[in-house]
Image: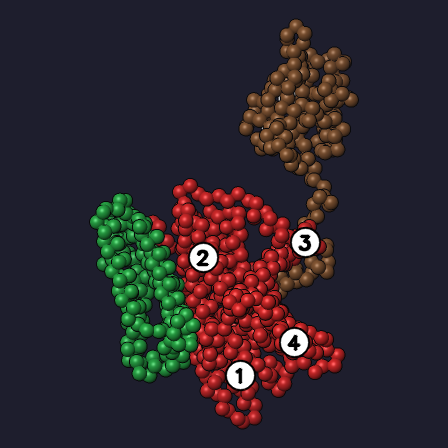
Chain colours: A green, B brown, C red
């Protein structure tokens, strides 16, 4: 059991890489590699950055593991393993480790044609949502104009711990 | 702003010229091949102090009178002096022990400035690589003693002044006009031959 | 059957007469087949995977050593000094001495460091980079692995470098390490986009994600003399420039080596590493440089293709490594010439300049293909110049605009007051 949040995040990254490996073994090369790029390359970094920027120290590590948390952990792990087992037991032949030969392999070209043809609306909507998020992030990160009369604000520095947020709100409200 | 990237290209040409030029013309080299080739040290360069002796005997000829002024003035306190004693236990004007820890010395030359007897000067030897970084870098009297000839070679201009000064001192002392000199130079602290 | 050929054992196919051209070209493959042939049936499949892996690692390990010496020698020459010239002939064995030094150095781990992550970080840094070397075609028959998504594989495994940088920086428990890791990650993420965009242009034009096929798409010559490499087209030229700029940043090379800016943050995320672990980081960095250089060669410079039809007699892997050497020399030259950027310059350059130009280049490539149907006399030149203008003019104008709008003045630190 890991007590530090960063370790948990890194382990999550590892398991995402493992999932990518499963995809590749199942013949979905493109999906697996995309999974690696997106989860290992981007989302994992996002998560660790979020952890690093977390101000509340007590969230970052768990001092003592209670019996309850052990029970929960083991139960969840058992549940997942059980589901996987059932799934595997009732599935026949994914083509084995040979991958490309037997699996429901989809050529990258076909994948692209599907995304651009049949599922174009969903694809574009997802793209739009991401673009909106990107623009939102840019707006959040834009330098806000410090109004002239706010130059005296420096005296009342926000209390430690909430400084970043408080100043940001102050700057935007002004 | 002129043509885009002109500065970049000029930079690349410059470094490229160095790259080729240093193969074609070794005179471009700004470094020397150290152990084989050495640059002469400038006259006023200094590294660690040494002790000057006159005559042939590095032990008896030491100019140092063990007055310990340098020991007191040395900022990092790296000089250690024990005066010699004569058979009746009175201090002689000679050091029994004179150590400088050059791993501590910061080459400030203060000891040279304060010595009234021109007996400690700055050396220019810089290669002090030793197997033992403690004992090997603790220099004793015998390691520090250098003839005046050596000093003249290192710092010719400075040595000439010092030599002239010492010669005049000796002359005055021998002609017995010391008292007159002292009267003519009130409180100047002129380094003399002692009292 | 070549009369002045020599007798060669072509794998287990038996003896026959082969010409020197074929011998050099196919030699490595025969050697592998011959070695594999000795093995029992079960071990063959393993050996066939293992032999290329070992070969790639050995070749690039040696190249790593030579590149470190070459880098120091060339940098020295650029600064008008001879560089290392003591160990071995002309100093070329310096890397062996360095290796011994690194191996025998004390391995210091900070007391409050996270020992496991601290230990794992160099491995996570080196292993993916070594993996990405697998998909690059080194010669006509020399590629360790040719997955259908070779290019995607290259970038996918490369993305683990960010995690490695974070692991190294965070586990060291050192503020400089963490700052270096933050810088490294910000830089890698920012520059991955222009890198991928310019690679994407090639994918679009070649119509394949497989690096082997991309190289094959560049075979042939225009009028029998100009090789049909992508760099000979306007979008390819622009793409190569963009790619090289982004590649320097993605592999932490000067002038984008801020993550280890010695003058500000000591050694970045490598601050707390010493001895062999440091050497592994170092190796990862060089391997990264080789990998992106190899990718640039593959995508834009025709991979293993010879520049002239008559020169095809030389083995194809020779051409590849020659081009790779040119790329490495270019990186070294850049390092010797350009000063290090500031963090905000770096990010602005990536996001505001390289990224839009990369997207524009994609468009230019489309136009290039669209104009392919022109058939009037001089169409080729017109098409060429039109496309070059389409990417070149915006590059210049946009650059000027950015320069003008930057505004010189004291820098404001918003959150540091
Ligand atoms: S000041 Fe001069 S004379 Fe006095 S102890 Fe030092 S070296 Fe000797
Ligand atoms: S040079 Fe300075 S530090 Fe060195 S012994 Fe003399 S007074 Fe001391």
Q: Is B154 rendered above or below residue C294?
A: above
Q: Using the image, name the chain to which the residue with label 4 belongs.
A: C
Q: Position of residue C204 (x, y in %)?
A: 45, 79
Q: Residues within 10 Å of mark 4 (few under 14, many from 20)?
A: few
- Of labels 1 and 3, earlier in sequence is 3
Q: Is B97 rendered above or below residue C260?
A: above
- Of labels 4 and 3, earlier in sequence is 4
* Residue at 69%, 58% in the rendered image: B22
Asked which secondary structure carries label 2, the reply is helix
* Residue at 51%, 62% in the rendered image: C130
Question: Are dots 2 and 3 on a single chain?
Answer: yes
User: Marks 4 and 3: CB-CB under 8 Å?
Assistant: no
Residue with the most extreme bottom position = C376
- Of labels 4 and 1, earlier in sequence is 4
Q: Position of residue A88 (x, y in %)?
A: 30, 68
Front-most of C363 and C209? C209
* Residue at 52%, 86% in the rendered image: C383
Asked which secondary structure carries label 4, the reply is loop
Question: Are dots 4 and 3 on a single chain?
Answer: yes
Q: CA distance from mark 1 to mark 3?
A: 46 Å
**What residue is pinned by disc 3?**
C91
- Of labels 2 and 3, earlier in sequence is 3
Q: CA distance from mark 2 to mark 1?
A: 44 Å
Report the side of B100 relative to A72 (left or right). right
**What residue is pinned by disc 1?**
C384
Front-most of A5 and B77? A5
Q: Residues within 10 Å of mark 1 (few under 14, many from 20)?
A: some
Foreground mark, 1 or 3, reads 3
Asked which secondary structure carries label 3, the reply is helix
């Amino acid at each position: 059991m890991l007590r530090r949040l960063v370790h948990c995040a890194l382990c999550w990254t590892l398991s995402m890489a493992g999932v990518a490996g499963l995809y590749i073994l199942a013949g979905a090369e493109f999906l697996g590699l995309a999974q690696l790029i997106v989860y290992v390359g981007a989302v994992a970094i996002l998560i660790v950055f979020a952890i690093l920027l977390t101000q509340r120290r007590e969230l970052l590590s768990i001092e003592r593991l209670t019996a309850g948390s052990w029970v929960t952990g083991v139960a969840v792990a058992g549940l997942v393993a059980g589901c996987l087992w059932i799934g595997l037991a009732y599935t026949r032949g994914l083509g084995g480790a040979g991958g490309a030969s037997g699996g429901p392999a989809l050529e990258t070209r076909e994948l692209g044609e599907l995304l651009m043809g049949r599922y174009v609306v969903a694809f574009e909507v997802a793209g739009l949502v991401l673009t909106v998020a990107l623009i939102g992030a840019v707006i959040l990160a834009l330098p806000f104009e410090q109004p002239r009369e706010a130059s005296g604000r420096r005296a009342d520095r926000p209390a430690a711990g909430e400084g970043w947020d408080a100043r940001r709100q102050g700057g935007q409200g002004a | 702003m002129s043509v885009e990237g002109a500065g970049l290209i000029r930079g690349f040409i410059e470094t490229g010229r160095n790259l080729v030029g240093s193969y074609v013309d070794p005179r471009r080299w700004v470094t020397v091949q150290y152990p084989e080739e050495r640059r002469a040290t400038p006259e006023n360069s200094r590294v660690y102090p040494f002790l000057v002796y006159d005559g042939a005997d590095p032990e008896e000829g030491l100019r140092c009178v063990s007055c310990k002024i340098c020991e007191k003035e040395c900022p990092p306190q790296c000089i250690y002096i024990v005066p010699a004693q004569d058979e009746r236990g009175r201090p002689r004007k000679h050091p029994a022990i004179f150590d400088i820890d050059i791993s501590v010395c910061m080459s400030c030359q203060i000891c040279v400035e304060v010595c009234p007897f021109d007996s400690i000067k700055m050396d220019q030897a810089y290669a002090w690589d030793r197997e033992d970084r403690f004992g090997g870098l603790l220099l004793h009297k015998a390691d520090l003693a250098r003839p005046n000839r050596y000093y003249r070679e290192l710092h010719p201009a400075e040595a000439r002044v010092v030599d002239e000064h010492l010669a005049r001192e000796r002359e005055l002392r021998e002609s017995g006009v010391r008292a007159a000199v002292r009267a003519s130079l009130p409180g100047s602290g002129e380094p003399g031959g002692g009292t | 059957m070549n009369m002045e050929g020599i007798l060669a054992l072509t794998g287990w196919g038996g003896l026959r007469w082969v010409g020197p051209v074929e011998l050099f070209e196919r030699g490595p493959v025969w050697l592998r087949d011959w070695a594999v042939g000795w093995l029992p049936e079960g071990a063959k499949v393993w050996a066939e995977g293992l032999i290329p892996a070992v070969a790639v690692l050995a070749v690039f390990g040696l190249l790593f050593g030579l590149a470190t010496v070459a880098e120091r020698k060339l940098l020295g020459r650029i600064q008008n000094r001879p560089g290392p010239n003591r160990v071995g002939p002309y100093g070329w064995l310096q890397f062996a001495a360095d290796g011994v030094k690194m191996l025998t150095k004390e391995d210091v781990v900070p007391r409050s460091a996270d020992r496991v992550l601290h230990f794992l970080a160099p491995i996570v840094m080196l292993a993916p980079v070594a993996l990405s070397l697998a998909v690059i075609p080194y010669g006509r028959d020399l590629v360790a692995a040719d997955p259908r998504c070779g290019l995607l594989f290259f970038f996918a495994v490369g993305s683990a470098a960010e995690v490695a940088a974070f692991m190294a920086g965070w586990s060291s428990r050192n503020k400089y390490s963490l700052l270096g890791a933050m810088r490294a990650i910000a830089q890698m993420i920012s520059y991955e986009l222009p890198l991928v965009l310019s690679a994407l242009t090639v994918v679009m034009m070649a119509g394949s994600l497989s690096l082997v096929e991309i190289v094959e798409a560049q075979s042939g010559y225009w009028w029998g003399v100009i090789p049909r490499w992508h760099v000979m087209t306007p979008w390819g030229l622009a793409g190569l420039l963009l790619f090289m700029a982004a590649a320097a940043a993605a592999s932490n090379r000067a002038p984008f080596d801020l993550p280890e800016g010695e003058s500000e943050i000591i050694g970045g995320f490598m601050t707390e590493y010493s001895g062999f672990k440091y050497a592994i980081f170092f190796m990862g960095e060089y391997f990264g440089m080789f990998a992106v250089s190899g990718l640039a060669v593959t995508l834009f410079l025709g991979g293993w293709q010879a520049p002239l039809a008559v020169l095809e007699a030389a083995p194809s892997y020779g051409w590849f490594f020659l081009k790779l050497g040119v790329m490495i020399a270019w990186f070294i030259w850049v390092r010797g010439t350009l000063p290090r950027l500031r963090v905000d310059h770096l990010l602005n350059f990536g996001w505001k300049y390289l990224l839009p130009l990369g997207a524009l280049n994609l468009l230019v490539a489309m136009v290039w293909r669209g104009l392919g149907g022109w058939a009037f006399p001089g169409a080729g030149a017109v098409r060429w110049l039109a496309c070059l203008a389409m990417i070149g003019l915006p590059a210049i104008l946009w650059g000027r605009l950015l320069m003008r709008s930057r505004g010189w003045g004291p820098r404001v630190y918003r959150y540091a007051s």
